[in-house]
Image: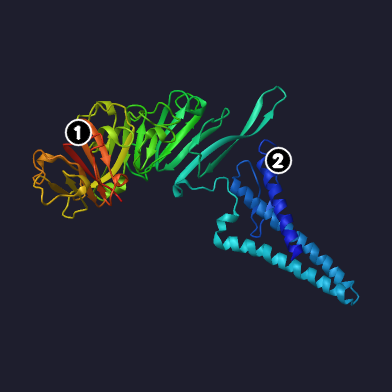
């Protein structure tokens, strides 16, 4: 057993050494020996061989080396057996050597057999084995494989082109020499690609690509990361497409600072000054992507607030074509809007469906504290509002049960819902975090909307 472990460690060391040698020898002129496989195929490493092909080549080298070692052991063990002269200890030792060599040969050839059964293509060396039509991401890299300096001082460069299935989503310092390039042949599910003329996302952003629809499986092809539009890209940023909210620090869904924008979130944010990166009062345009919800008849939405903790001026982000706003400062006025401008400090996200017959939640408002109505006090009122999946917005005086002059002091939330109360242009959102007794918000008298006359009910996902 010890010998088998030592033999395994030896093979692993040889494997690691060969890999490192191969990996770091791109700039050297090396001719690798041809190897003939069991099937008669001749294989050899060239400048066009992929990393996967190098592993396959090393596998064959190790199998061949192991087979030679096992045969040598068999021959020596046979000699020992012949020369044992009937001595029991020597005969037993020689038999153990023969048995160990035989097991080694069986293991080596079994590994080949197993791989060929799983996938025969694994044992073949190809220059570019990736079929771009069958993978979600396909990137073509052209790099300098070697440089030869001629007697006259000129250089001859040999280039190596490989196709891979991955690429870093961001590169802060893209160093490419003359003739080298990165070409996105296929990328599934990308939202946008930005390039920058300087390292660390500095300089005027170059929009290489930006999606115009909400399809999460949209396929983007033929996008070059360098050079682009005649200028060398020194850094880039690839933003994948996910369901949620994208915020931009420039109008028209453009970015100014590539290190922080676009900012992505798929949940409510109570304070953008505490996010990483910090995005307080920087949003100038926005886009909401929720295609799977749309297929179910559900309309996603967001409420923007000008102060942290869901307070201040507020603006409803819903009902606009393609769920985007190109400029928050020029949006149409509604009851939920003061001079909002570019003052996004917090956001509540929700999902609204078409109103149906099924009640999904209810909110009961009281003009008394602690969500209680004194039956002996005729001035105490309560009014229950049903949420049937849809966004609800109204003045209290327009509700028959509430009536003119109704002023809410407390309310109870039953089910997945949130409440926004407004007083003038001041807004405040209330949800589970504000419960003081069960599902009751006992008092709003200390809030910024203590004399609220208008409400908005938001259906939530939880």
Q: Position of residue 8 (x, y in %)?
A: 71, 59
Where is residue 10? Give x, y as percent. Answer: 74, 55
Residue 316 visible in the current orientation? no
144 with respect to 267 (left or right): right
The quadrant of the picture occupied by the N terminus is bottom right
The disc label shown at residue 30, or none: 2
- The quadrant where residue 273 appears: top left
How many numbered callouts?
2
Instruction: Tell which of 157 and 451 is nearer to you.
Output: 451
Residue occupying image coordinates x 48% and y 28%: 201
Depicted 460 relative to depicted 68: above or below: above
Q: Which residue is at a point 60% across and 55% down the rendered structure image? A: 123
Figure colour scheme = rainbow
Q: Earlier along the polypeptide chain: callout 2 or callout 1? A: 2
> Dot 2 lies on which element?
loop
Q: Residues within 10 Å of mark 1 (few under 14, many from 20)?
A: some
Compare residues 132 and 169 and report the one nearer the observer: 169
Residue 117 in the image: x percent, y percent? 56, 63
In the shown orientation, is residue 335 left or right of residue 461? left
Q: CA distance from mark 2 to mark 1?
A: 78 Å
- 129 shown above or below 192: below
* Numbered mark located on residue 254 in the image: none
x and y, in percent, of residue 154 in the image = 67, 24
> Residue 423, which numbered label?
1
Closer mark to the observer between disc 2 and disc 1: 1
Q: Secondary structure at mark 1?
A: strand
Q: Is residue 362 visible?
A: yes
């Amino acid at each position: 057993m010890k010998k088998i472990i030592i033999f395994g460690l030896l093979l692993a060391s040889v494997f690691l050494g060969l890999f490192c040698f191969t990996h770091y020898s791109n700039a050297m002129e090396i001719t690798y020996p041809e190897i003939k496989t069991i099937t008669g195929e001749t294989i050899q490493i060239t400048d066009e061989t992929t990393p996967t092909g190098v592993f396959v080549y090393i596998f064959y080298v190790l199998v061949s080396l192991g087979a030679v070692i096992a045969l040598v052991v068999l021959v020596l063990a046979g000699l020992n057996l012949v020369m044992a002269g009937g001595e029991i200890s020597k005969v037993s030792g020689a038999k153990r050597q023969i048995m160990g060599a035989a097991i080694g040969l069986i293991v080596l050839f079994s590994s080949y057999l197993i791989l060929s059964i799983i996938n025969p293509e694994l044992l073949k060396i190809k220059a570019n084995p990736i079929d771009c039509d069958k993978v979600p991401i396909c990137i073509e890299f052209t790099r300098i494989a070697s440089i030869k300096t001629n007697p006259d001082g000129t250089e001859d460069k040999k280039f190596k082109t490989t196709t891979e299935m991955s690429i870093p989503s961001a590169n802060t310092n893209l160093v490419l020499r003359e003739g080298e390039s990165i070409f996105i042949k296929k990328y599934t599910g990308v939202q946008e690609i930005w390039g920058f003329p300087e390292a660390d996302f500095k300089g005027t952003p170059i929009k290489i690509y930006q999606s115009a629809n909400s399809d999460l499986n949209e396929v983007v092809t033929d996008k070059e990361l360098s050079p682009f539009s005649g200028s060398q890209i020194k850094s880039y940023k690839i933003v994948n497409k996910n369901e949620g909210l994208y915020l931009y620090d420039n109008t028209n869904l453009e970015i100014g600072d590539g290190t922080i924008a676009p900012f992505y979130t798929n949940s409510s944010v109570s304070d953008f000054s505490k996010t990483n990166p910090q995005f307080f009062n920087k949003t100038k345009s926005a886009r909401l992507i929720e295609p799977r919800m749309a297929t179910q008849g559900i309309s996603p939405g967001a409420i923007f607030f000008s102060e942290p903790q869901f307070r201040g001026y507020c603006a409803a982000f819903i009902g606009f074509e393609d769920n985007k706003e190109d400029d928050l400062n020029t949006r149409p006025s509604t009851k939920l809007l003061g001079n909002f401008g570019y003052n996004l400090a917090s956001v509540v996200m929700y999902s609204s469906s078409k109103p149906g017959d099924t009640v999904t939640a209810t909110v009961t408002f009281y003009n008394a504290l602690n969500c209680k109505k004194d039956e002996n006090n005729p001035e105490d009122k309560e009014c229950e509002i049903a949420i049937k999946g849809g966004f609800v917005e109204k003045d209290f005086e327009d509700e028959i049960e509430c009536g003119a002059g109704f002023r809410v002091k407390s309310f109870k939330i039953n089910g997945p819902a949130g409440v926004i109360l407004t007083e003038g242009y001041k807004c405040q959102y209330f949800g589970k975090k504000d419960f003081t007794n069960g599902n009751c918000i006992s008092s709003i008298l200390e809030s910024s909307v203590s004399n609220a006359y208008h409400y908005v009910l938001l259906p939530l996902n939880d």
